[in-house]
Amino acid sequence: MLDIIRARLLQGYRTHPFPKEPPTLPEDFRGLPLLEGGCPGTCRSCIDVCPTGALSKDDGELVLDMGLCLFCGACARACARGKIAFSRDYRLARRRREDLLVRPGPARPLFETQGPSPFRHSLHLRQVSAGGCNACEADCNVLGTLTFDMERFGIFFSASPRHADGLLVTGPVTANMALALRKAYDALPRPRLVIAAGSCAVSGGLYAGHDETLRGAPSLLPVDCYIPGCPPSPWTLLDGLLRLMGGPVRNGAEG
Ligand code: SF4
């Protein structure tokens, strides 16, 4: 028993002080994409290597859809002119699908709550894996560990949608899961939220266009918060959830 107490004292308080301090990100972390204008009109080297069709050209300028992007970095490696880079900005959650489109120039606004949120003090979520590969689910799971400790912010995963404020959807929504997802949504009390977490849930991701999948949660439900990534970093998830609740992140380190 004394050994346990000694070990506990030596370990100290292990929970990260986020959001008062910025998160500790891995060295190879890829966050908000940064695009430079002035691409030669005929060059398609980045577009051709993208596995999900996240890159396109609009009026000659590159557009990167974070909702489809896997953050694999292949486009940045393929561009000989260095027009694509990935910053270390983990704050990728957005309120509207169109705000996930990145173009050369200033970034789209961060997610902001409009007026006081009824979920400011607590947010109970039912997680629905609608055909996910378990990567997004694992990063949601890790939010309950001592480093992230989402419960200190009043965020909890709920066993039943009847006891939840919203759904946190992962996966592209397979045909087999569509009815279950719809039923889970219908069981939520009002007001209710839907969060699409990960490129599959945002857009269908790698599986967009497959006969047996829909194009993510928006094909079936109204989405209140889009969190891109494949999978999203736990910090990106936590930042998005706190923004959805309104407040805690804005009081902390905005970088
Ligand atoms: S990082 Fe995103 S946009 Fe670039 S190649 Fe990979 S999936 Fe496509």
Image (spheres, grey):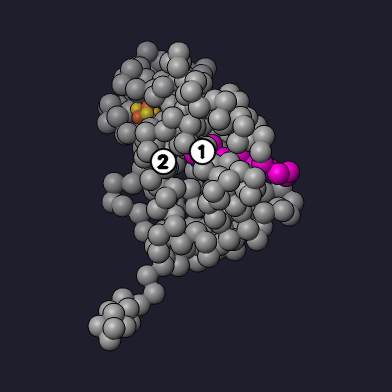
Asked whether mark 2 lies closer than 8 Å to ligand 1, one says no
Residue 184 in the image: state x and y as whole percent.
60, 36
Is 194 covered by the magenta stretch? yes
- Label 1 sits on residue: 128
- At 56% from the left and 62% from the top, the residue drawn is 153
Give the alpha-carbon distance from disc 1 to disc 2, as whole Å: 11 Å
Task: Determine whether, in the image, residue 119 is placed left or right of residue 216.
Answer: right
- At 50% from the left and 27% from the top, the residue drawn is 177
- Label 2 sits on residue: 136
Chain part drawn in magenta: 188-197
The quarter in which the N terminus is drawn is bottom left
Is 83 placed above or below 29 here? above
Q: Residue furthest left?
A: 3
Q: Secondary structure at mark 1?
A: strand
Task: Determine whether, in the image, residue 94 is placed left or right of residue 61.
Answer: right
Amino acid carrying label 1: it is Val
Viewer can see residue 184: yes
